[in-house]
Image (cartoon, rainbow, N blue to C red):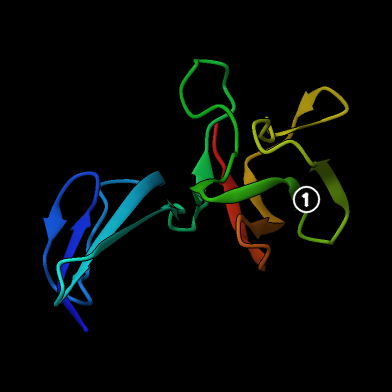
């Protein structure tokens, strides 16, 4: 019969049989358990626990492509994305596609064929998977202001 449990986390320890522990950030952490029975015999096991980041998605609702170095591109951001599955489309109000990229680091600069478009409201759509493989789809509007 097991009489003692000693859990070693990074950081922290516990002597509870079934402890809970909060890790400080996403990453991989070794967790060691040493159990001792009523005869004083001990056994040890260490396993790696991987804490994945929380999935987030944010898209601004306006941008100013006036080349002042501030807010010049429409670029959604977030965490825990599988960037290999990322797709961004931008359309005008009549549904004509103005822009598409599958690079999560490159946003729309408000232009079509090298010309910055007029101040207006445009429609965008993003499809991507999170790091767990679950698909996500978002759409909304973006105001282009000069």
Q: Nearer the viewer, residue 85 or 42?
A: 42
Answer with left or right where residue 84 lies relative to residue 48.
Answer: right
Answer with left or right where residue 39 lies relative to residue 73.
Answer: left
Residue 23, position in %: x, y? 27, 52
Residue 49, position in %: x, y? 42, 54
x 60%, y 31%: residue: 73
- Residue that label 1 marks: 89
Residue extending farthest to the bottom is 1
13 is higher (above) or lower (below) than 111: below
Residue 116, position in %: x, y? 73, 28
Q: In the picture, residue 101 is in which quadrant?
A: top right
x 50%, y 51%: residue: 61
Residue extending farthest to the top is 68
118 is higher (above) or lower (below) than 114: below
Residue extending farthest to the front is 39
Q: Secondary structure at mark 1?
A: strand
Q: In the picture, residue 132 is in which quadrant?
A: bottom right
x 24%, y 51%: residue: 9
x 54%, y 38%: residue: 145
Q: In the picture, residue 17 is in which quadrant?
A: bottom left
Answer with left or right where residue 45 lies relative to residue 22.
Answer: right
């Amino acid at each position: 019969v097991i009489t003692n449990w000693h859990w070693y986390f990074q950081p922290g320890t516990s002597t509870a049989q079934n402890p809970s522990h909060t890790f400080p950030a996403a990453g991989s952490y070794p967790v060691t358990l040493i159990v001792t029975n009523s005869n004083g015999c001990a056994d040890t096991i260490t396993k790696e626990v991987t804490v994945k980041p929380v999935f987030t998605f944010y898209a601004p609702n306006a941008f100013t492509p006036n080349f002042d170095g501030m807010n010049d591109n429409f670029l959604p951001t977030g965490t825990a994305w599988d960037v290999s599955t990322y797709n961004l489309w931008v359309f005008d109000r009549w549904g004509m596609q103005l822009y598409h990229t599958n690079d999560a680091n490159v946003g729309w600069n408000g232009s079509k064929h090298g010309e910055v478009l007029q101040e207006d409201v445009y429609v965008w759509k993003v499809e991507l998977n999170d790091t767990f493989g679950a698909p996500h789809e978002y759409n909304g509007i973006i105001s282009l202001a000069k």
